Image (cartoon, helix red, strand yellow):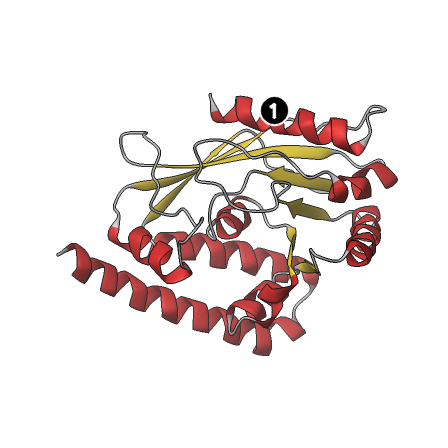
Amino acid sequence: MRQLKALWRISRVLLHVLAGAWRVRMVFPRLTQPERDAQVQAWAQAMLARLAIQLVVHGKPPVGGPLLLAANHISWLDIVVIHAARHCRFISKSDIQHWPVVGTLATGAGTLYIERASRRDAMRVVHHMAERLSAGEVLAVFPEGTTGDGSHVLPFHANLLQAAIAVNAPVQPVALQFVDAQGQQSFAPCYIGDDTLIGSLWRTLCSDGIHAVVHFGSPQTADGRDRRAWAAALRDTIIALRQR
């Protein structure tokens, strides 16, 4: 029965993904940016519903920018979850841009791409982020640089925080968790180590009662800290938010 339910869910998910890609190609060119942002958020909320995942939001999502969201990273679902709570422009690894269908969706959502192995490209992205922040946008990064299993928060990389320092923009810490109906940590959506995207998706589809919990902390400014000190402070704040 659980597998039959998962097959039903995955058919709805695939149709939703394809419909989203079609809208990005055919409808988005005629929309204003605020209209696109609203449609991305609505699409993400509908995706969580098709995955039978309930979104739980604590704290206050940002009303507007300039602002940089800094979140811990657990799953491929994290971007969908944050978009469902508040649309933003993510900074993601460049190979996602070339993934079939997913790349179309990511680009349509306004993703900025970075070649993580290239120091020069990191400088380019920081400059581009600073421009977008100066234009009043809300951006989002995963400072861990990779996914963890959700039981702890990995050390933060500080490079991309330089964009917020350069334009004196605040950073809002965001703590992500996946829990079951009893409030215990759910490992179903995890995407680490030897996990494959298909395997993680199948575990998620076979699970019931998953809650995606998003804790928005209070925005903070650098206040004279360099990016490394600020990254460490943001990590501590996210750890504290996850313990509430």
In which image quadrant can residue 18 be found? bottom left
242 or 84, nearer to the observer: 242
Q: Amino acid at mark 1?
A: Thr
Which residue matches tag 1? 237
- Percent across and percent down for residue 140 are 65, 46
For the point 44% across and 49% down, which residue is it?
193
- Quarter location, residue 200: bottom left
Q: Quadrant of residue 25?
A: bottom right
Can residue 209 be seen here? The reply is yes
Q: Taking 133 as reference, is 103 above or below it?
A: below
The image shows residue 2 at horizontal and vertical percentages of 17, 54
Q: Is residue 141 left or right of residue 79?
A: right
Q: Residue at x 61, y 61 (%)?
A: 109
Which residue occupies 38% across, 48% down?
189
The answer to whether residue 234 is above or below residue 192 is above
- Judged from the image, the secondary structure of the residue bearing numbered disc 1 is helix
Quadrant (top left, top right, bottom left, bottom right) of the N terminus: bottom left
Q: Position of residue 106 (x, y in %)?
A: 58, 63
Most foreground residue, 180 or 65: 180
Horizontal side of 11 relative to 35 (left or right) equals: left
Residue 157: x percent and y percent?
A: 68, 39
Q: Nearer the viewer, residue 166 or 43?
A: 166
